[in-house]
């Protein structure tokens, strides 16, 4: 991204978009909160991203994080910053902080994920911002909530959404380590919770004229997502760790490895109907009437034995063979796709999950999951260079050229 | 933002009428969120057994207990009307409800909607200012549009999440019941709110929606976007040979797990060494730089494994915090009911439901409103009479509906 000239992608707002005319000040960083701003931008909001002189650390993740696939293209930055305008302000400098107030005064939404102690220091708590613009919707993201013993802990989705919620622990196999998550998995889910909160704030403002505080936390979203088991915990009920594949609860709802190291997840809900077809599909029609396995109860009681029979059967053929054979026998199974399969998945395009982008480096991107019949999401442009729009945005806020020059950050990229 | 922020007298969605004809979890959970914030949610379900989700609590993949805890979570605040939508009179009664509704939430497979005339075009004819919210497994068109979707397949499997959660040579990860459903629910809520915003400005209703698959891909967005530019990552190496020993999990003496996540590594490494009281590690050239630590991650992991195994997790929690080392403890659900932070974060709410006195709040927090307190969830058809009367049906019409089996 350094030194690459990118076309200015600040197109005028589209009137047909539901958030046309809404100005969002995104002073957040990393992924969860910025992704909420991305969604608002997709649907027409003018998103102004305020970054410090070193920029949002998310700019460095492709290069710096071992869990990110490597690429010469800063795909993560483009994904999370499409259609945003970047303004550099060193908020520790009084003149820059004053310039931010000028932007706050003309904005509709502010998205903030600074830790509380930083908000206090920078005077960016809700009460500070409300004093400048009482009509603003102040959207707060925290790791663990706005109060309580952990309110000051920085939150990442691996820790706050997955670990602290009990999710990782509940994803253990017996005797095994906790579950894992893909990069930003919880962040992007949390972003949709924050979008909902912001839209409720805007709705209330339409009715009353007043701004408000709205928010959410990674922890709240993590526990919401494991709501079934969390609700069970509240009545004292728990799931034992999942038994290993060799000793499943049901051989008909288990994972099997194929010859080419792919995985088939059998998901058989109506067992009696599908048992005969399954036996035929694995080339063992006699199994259907085998007295060991003839009823649901018998199959459960001998799940390990049956799982071993299936395991041997599945490993004899490749995934493509099983996909076709099981489908022909009307046997439901879950596809364990590899992310390699996504770019060619036609259904992903139909679902709106993969969309074209107006970005010379990156022709396609990941759509936000909202679909509307009355609007198409804005075409995604490239993520902005650091401070690419500082001048034009500050001018829009009414600063004079002299004031803008006086704001030169102490270190320019 | 404090707890004594002024609350509006009225909940933000008071006055909104939502017709929820959906079943299972993802779409009904969106209706719960709307109900939490004041919407009148009318759940239309088949007479007799009602929504099949009413028996999910007996599913072998669910924790075992003798109260229908799931129904409390997914049925709260709703009024239940039992109508047979395949029956002409039942469908006519439904149209009366449709005419007065603001939002309808539907997740029938598309062929079923065609058969029942419950597509957006059918419904718009009755009420053109309705917001029609559609959830599908995989999207409204395409080769898989008719495939029923469970989140384990549509959200987690198909989007590549389970595969990407593998350790080398290990099986894919697995998801918890409805884990993806409730994420998709927040998207449905957002979509509905966008539809309502547009309606406020134009008077027009419209179709809004999402799919489990689109939500899964969004959630897996980082890796999915990388895939689109040809960037891939090899399966996660096993825990004892990680790529980065400072972003790995370690077992404590009492079989709990500490998850180190040192993002700003150089600072974090210093602090970790102090927390472990291992000045020798800081001086060790094998671990002196980020590059060195990566190259020697197996050796470092062995050392850290041994170090963490010496104490219980309570010790580590205290010590790591005191030294400002970023970490997560792998909590267990057993600890959730007593977790003060969950209380502060507004996650757990009291109910007026004697069987299930506490429940899980949706994740939206508003400075001007608190979610409604939930009573017991409805039995099948508990509010049929009340709701149909509100819709203008006479007692005679309601009796006729019942005797023909079109309603209950």
Image: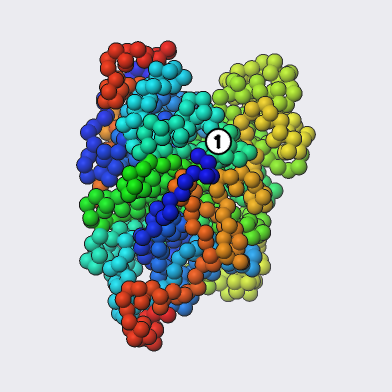
Q: Badge 1: how crowded within 10 Å, few (<14), some, or many (20+)?
A: many
Question: Which color scheme did the rendering employ for the protein?
Answer: rainbow
Horizontal relation, residue A283 to residue A194: left or right: right
Could you tell me residue B300's position as x and y percent? 67, 26
Asked which quadrant contains residue B322, the reply is top right
Q: Residue at x 63, y 38 (%)?
A: A149
In the image, is residue B126 above or below residue A93? Answer: below
Q: Mark 1 points at which residue?
A: A155
Could you tell me residue B368's position as x and y percent? 44, 47
A303, A178: nearer the viewer:
A178
Q: Residue at x 52, y 44 (%)?
A: B4
A259, B212: nearer the viewer:
B212
Q: Which residue is drawn at 58% across and 33% down?
A: A152
In the image, is residue B291 above or below residue A236? Answer: above
Regarding residue A141, the answer to whether it shows in the image is yes
Horizontal relation, residue A31 to residue A46: left or right: right
């Amino acid at each position: 991204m350094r030194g690459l000239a990118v076309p200015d992608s600040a197109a005028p707002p589209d009137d047909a978009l539901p958030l046309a005319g809404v100005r969002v000040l995104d002073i957040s960083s990393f992924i969860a909160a910025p992704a909420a701003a991305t969604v608002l931008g997709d649907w027409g909001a003018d998103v102004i991203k305020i970054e410090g002189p070193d920029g949002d650390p998310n700019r460095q993740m492709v290069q710096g994080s071992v869990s990110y696939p490597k690429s010469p293209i800063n795909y993560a930055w483009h994904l999370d910053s499409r259609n945003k305008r970047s303004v550099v302000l060193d908020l520790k400098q009084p003149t820059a902080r004053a310039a931010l107030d000028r932007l706050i005064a003309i904005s509709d939404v502010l998205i903030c994920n600074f830790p509380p102690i930083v908000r206090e220091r920078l005077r960016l708590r809700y009460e500070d911002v409300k004093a400048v613009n009482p009509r603003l919707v102040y959207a707060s993201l925290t790791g663990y909530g706005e109060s309580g013993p952990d309110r000051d802990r920085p939150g990442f989705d691996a820790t706050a959404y997955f670990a602290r919620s009990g999710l990782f622990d509940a994803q253990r196999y017996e005797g095994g380590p906790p579950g894992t998550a893909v990069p930003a998995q919880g962040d992007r889910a949390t972003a949709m919770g924050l979008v909902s909160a912001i839209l409720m704030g805007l709705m209330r403002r339409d009715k009353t004229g007043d701004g408000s505080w709205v928010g959410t936390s990674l922890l709240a979203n993590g526990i919401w997502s494991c709501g079934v088991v969390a609700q069970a915990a509240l009545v004292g009920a728990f799931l034992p760790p999942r038994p290993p594949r060799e000793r499943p609860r049901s051989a008909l709802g288990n994972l099997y490895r194929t010859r080419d190291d792919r995985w088939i997840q059998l998901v058989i809900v109506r067992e009696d109907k599908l048992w005969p077809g399954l036996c035929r599909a694995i080339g063992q029609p006699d199994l259907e009437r085998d007295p060991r396995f003839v009823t649901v109860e018998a199959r459960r009681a001998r799940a390990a034995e049956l799982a071993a029979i299936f395991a041997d059967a599945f490993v004899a053929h490749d995934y493509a063979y099983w996909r076709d054979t099981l489908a022909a026998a009307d046997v439901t199974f879950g596809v364990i796709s590899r992310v390699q399969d996504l770019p060619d998945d036609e259904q992903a395009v139909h679902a709106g999950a993969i969309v074209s982008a107006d970005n010379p480096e990156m022709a396609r991107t990941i759509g936000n999951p909202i679909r509307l019949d009355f609007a198409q999401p804005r075409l995604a442009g490239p993520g902005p260079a650091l401070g690419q729009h500082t001048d034009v945005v500050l001018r829009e806020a009414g600063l004079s050229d002299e004031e803008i020059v006086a704001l030169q950050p102490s270190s320019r990229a | 933002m404090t707890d004594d922020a002024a609350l509006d007298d009225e909940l933000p969605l008071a006055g909104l009428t939502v017709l929820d004809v959906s079943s299972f979890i993802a779409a009904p959970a969106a209706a719960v969120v709307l109900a939490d914030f004041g919407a009148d949610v009318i759940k239309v379900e088949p007479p007799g057994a009602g929504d099949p989700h009413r028996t999910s609590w007996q599913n072998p993949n669910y924790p075992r207990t003798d109260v229908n805890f799931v129904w409390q979570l997914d049925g709260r605040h709703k009024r239940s009307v039992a109508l047979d939508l395949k029956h002409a009179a039942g469908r006519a009664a439904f149209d009366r409800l449709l005419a007065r509704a603001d939002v309808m939430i539907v997740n029938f497979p598309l062929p079923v909607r065609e058969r029942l005339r419950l597509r957006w075009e059918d419904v718009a004819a009755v009420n053109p200012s309705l917001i029609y919210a559609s959830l599908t497994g995989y999207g409204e068109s395409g080769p898989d549009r008719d495939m029923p979707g469970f989140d384990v397949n549509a959200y987690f499997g198909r989007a590549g999440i389970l595969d990407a959660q593998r350790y080398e040579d290990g099986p894919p990860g697995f998801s918890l019941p409805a884990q993806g459903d409730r994420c998709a629910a927040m998207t449905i809520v957002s979509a509905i709110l966008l539809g309502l915003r547009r309606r406020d400005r134009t008077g027009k209703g419209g179709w809004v929606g999402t799919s489990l698959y689109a939500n899964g891909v969004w959630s897996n967005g980082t890796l999915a976007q990388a895939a689109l530019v040809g960037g891939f990552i090899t399966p996660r190496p096993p825990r004892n040979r990680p790529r980065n020993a400072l972003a790995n999990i370690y077992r404590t003496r009492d079989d709990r797990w500490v998850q180190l996540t040192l993002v700003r590594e150089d600072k974090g490494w210093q602090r970790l060494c102090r927390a472990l009281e291992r000045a020798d590690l800081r001086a060790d050239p094998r671990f002196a730089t980020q590059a060195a630590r990566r190259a020697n991650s197996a050796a470092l992991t062995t050392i850290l494994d041994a170090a963490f195994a010496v104490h219980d997790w309570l010790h580590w929690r205290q010590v790591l915090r005191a030294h400002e080392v970023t970490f997560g403890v792998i909590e267990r659900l057993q600890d959730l009911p007593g977790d003060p932070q969950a209380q502060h974060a507004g996650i757990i709410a009291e109910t007026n439901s004697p069987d299930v006195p506490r429940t899980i709040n949706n994740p939206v927090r508003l400075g001007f409103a608190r979610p409604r307190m939930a009573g017991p969830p409805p039995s099948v058809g508990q509010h049929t009479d009340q709701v149909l009367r509100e819709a203008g049906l006479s007692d005679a019409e309601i009796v006729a509906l019942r005797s023909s089996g079109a309603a209950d």
